[in-house]
Amino acid sequence: MRTITVRQAIQEALREEMRRDENVFLMGEDIAYYGSAYGVTKGFVDEFGEKRVKDTPISETAIIGAATGAALGGLRPIPEIMSINFALQALDQVVNHSAKLSYMFGGQMKVPMVMRTPAGWSQLSATHSQTLELLFAYIPGLKVVMPSTPYDHKGLLKSAIRDDDPVIFIEHALIYGAKGEVPEEEYLVPIGKSVVRRPGKDVTVVAYSRMAMLAMEAANDLAAEGIDVEVIDLRTLRPLDMEPVIESVKKTNRVVIAEEGWKTYGIGAEVQSRIYEEAFDYIDAPVRRVAGVEVPAPYNKHLEMAAYPHKANIVAAIREVLK
């Protein structure tokens, strides 16, 4: 099977869905002739034209408001927010309009919109390096997807574009260049399904996005020492599929949860709570959480590296939970 990057997988998903359905269109800041901040939409305006690849004013509120209106009118917009940090400007449109309209009108209105946005960090400092997926995963009415592999980026994005509910599709900027196997034939990955990325019997590691990739590296390293790690990739944060997690906990009896976000009130807190609610009798050691340091992201490279979790943190947590 061929190998492509996460960026190429996203491009393929967008291109295939735009060719399949003329109601699908892109909009966002500098996405047409500049090709977007991370080069994902480069060349799209040449193939699909300005009517379906629209540059917008620098107003995240206007972007999401216009996209929501277009979705209500029967189109399938894919607004790109240049950074998840800028999505804070659009929270009212997302939370009070996109997420709620279907419920407020008894399901008579649909908002088939996919808000694509990069997350992550790389010396972008306090206001541009935040891990904010939790804000969206908290809101009923939204579906929140944050994949790790190129295969899942393509399959989940295609599913999101065909979904009649608003979907927040979050891409970690540090893994745009990550490579993986992706088939050339048509396929979809269902939203709301976690996956066992690596089977194991000694300890369960639950993660998503970049941390799922680091969890796999940690598991492979520890395999050389005879430690058999099972890795669960959540892939979707709302709706949260806990079934593979609970089944894994019943088998391994020990759990590490890894995320880049702050530990307090984080995704890991929700997963940990659900494990204690649904599998308490199977736990043989306290659940360990790996998370970001609870400070605004520093600009200094050394401090930034210290603020975010890495593979070594996952390995240390696994050793701790196995004591």
Image: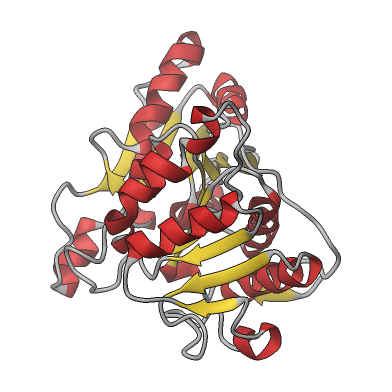
Name of the residue lying farthest toward the top: 281
Above or below: residue 275 compared with residue 288: above
With 321 as the anchor, is 188 left or right in this view? Answer: right
Q: Is residue 217 among the parts visible in the rendering?
A: no
Quarter of the image where one finds residue 262:
top left
- Colour convention of the picture: secondary structure
Q: Position of residue 306 (x, y in %)?
A: 20, 60
Quadrant of the snapshot with the N terminus: bottom right
Q: Residue 155 appears at what percent x and percent y?
A: 70, 57
The C terminus - image quarter: top left
Residue placed most toward the observer, 213 or 51: 51
How far across and down, in percent of the image, does residue 96 sit? Answer: 37, 40
- Give the total of numbered labels: 0
In this view, the residue in front, 168 or 254, is 168
> Where residue 36 sits in the image (x, y, percent)?
46, 80
> Which residue is at a point 64% across and 38% down the rendered structure image?
193
| Residue at 36%, 76% in the rendered image | 57
From the viewer's side, name the closer residue of 289 and 58.
Answer: 58
Q: Is residue 283 visible?
A: yes
Apparent side of residue 74 relative to residue 39 in the rendered image (left or right):
right
Vertical comparison of 161 with 16: above or below:
above
Please give the name of the residue rendered at 41% of the width and 77% of the height, measured from the top-left corner: 29
- Quarter assignment of residue 23: bottom right
